Image (spheres, rainbow, N blue to C red):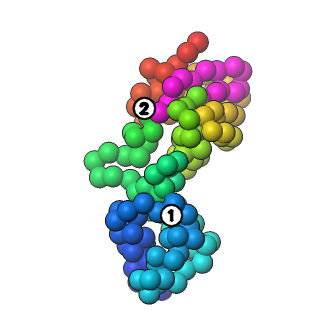
C-alpha cells in the first residue's frame, strides 16, 4: 500500500510540474491516463501531504526547491493591521485563501483560525497576543510581514 501512495504522489508531482492543472477532476483524469485511479478524498490528502497549493490563474503549484511557496506569497501581502484579538491581512486579489491556508497549515500558535475572502484575511488571535508576538510568529512563513505592518 505504501508503494501505491508513493507512486501516486510521484505521478501527481510530475503531472503538476509538466503543465497547469486547474481542478482535482482534471488531475484524477490525468492520473487515470497514467493507469492510477484515485478518489477525490485521496487526492485532497495527497495534495496536502505534498504541500501543493492552488493559485488563482495558475492552478495547482508544487513548492519549488530553494524557495518556499510562502516566500512566493509573501510579496502578495500588502498590509497587516490589529484590533484587540483580531488582525486583518490584505493581499493582492485572489491570494487571500492561499495565504490563509499556509497560516492554518503551519499552525501558528497565537492564531486560533483564519477566514479568507478574495483579498482579505481575518485572523482570530488568542487572548493576550500582541502585534509583536503575531508578527514574530508569522515571520518564518512570510519574511516580509513586519514591513507590511500598519498601525
Residue visible at 42% across and 60% down in the picture: 20
The magenta segment:
76-89
**Residues at circles 2 and 1 in contact by the CB criterion of under 8 Å:** no
- How far is disc 2 from disc 1 in space, using C-alphas? 23 Å
Question: How many labels were placed on the picture?
Answer: 2
Tell me if residue 120 comes above or below residue 10 in the rendering.
above
**120 or 51: which is nearer to us?**
120
The picture places residue 84, in percent across and down from the top left corner, at 71, 21
Query: Which residue is the site of mark 2?
Result: 75
**98 or 26: which is nearer to us?**
26
| Mark 2 nearby-residue class (10 Å; few <14, some 14–19, many ≥20) | some
Hey, which quadrant is residue 7 in on the image? bottom left
Tell me if residue 37 comes above or below residue 119 in the rendering.
below
Residue visible at 44% across and 83% down in the picture: 33
The picture places residue 113, in percent across and down from the top left corner, at 67, 41
Which quadrant holds the C terminus?
top right
Q: Residue furthest top?
A: 151
Q: Is residue 69 magenta?
A: no
Left or right: 116 as drawn, with respect to 77:
right
* Mark 2 residue element: loop
Residue visible at 41% across and 83% down in the picture: 34
**96 or 65: which is nearer to us?**
96
Residue 86: which numbered mark, if any? none
The picture places residue 92, in percent across and down from the top left corner, at 52, 32
Hey, which quadrant is residue 123 in on the image? top right
Closer to the chain start, of discs 2 and 1, is 1
Amino acid at each position: 500500500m505504501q508503494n501505491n501512495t508513493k507512486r501516486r504522489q510521484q505521478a501527481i508531482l510530475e503531472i503538476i510540474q509538466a503543465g497547469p492543472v486547474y481542478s482535482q477532476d482534471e488531475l484524477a483524469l490525468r492520473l487515470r491516463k497514467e493507469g492510477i485511479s484515485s478518489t477525490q478524498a485521496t487526492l485532497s490528502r495527497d495534495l496536502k501531504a505534498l504541500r501543493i497549493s492552488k493559485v488563482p490563474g495558475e492552478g495547482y503549484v508544487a513548492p519549488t526547491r530553494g524557495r518556499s511557496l510562502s516566500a512566493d506569497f509573501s510579496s502578495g501581502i500588502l498590509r497587516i493591521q490589529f484590533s484587540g484579538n483580531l488582525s486583518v491581512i490584505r493581499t493582492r486579489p485572489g491570494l487571500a485563501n492561499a495565504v490563509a491556508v499556509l497560516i492554518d497549515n503551519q499552525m501558528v500558535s497565537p492564531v486560533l483560525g483564519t477566514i479568507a475572502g478574495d483579498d482579505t484575511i481575518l485572523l482570530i488571535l488568542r487572548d493576550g497576543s500582541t502585534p509583536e508576538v503575531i508578527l514574530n510568529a508569522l515571520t518564518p512563513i512570510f519574511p516580509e510581514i513586519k514591513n507590511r505592518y500598519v498601525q
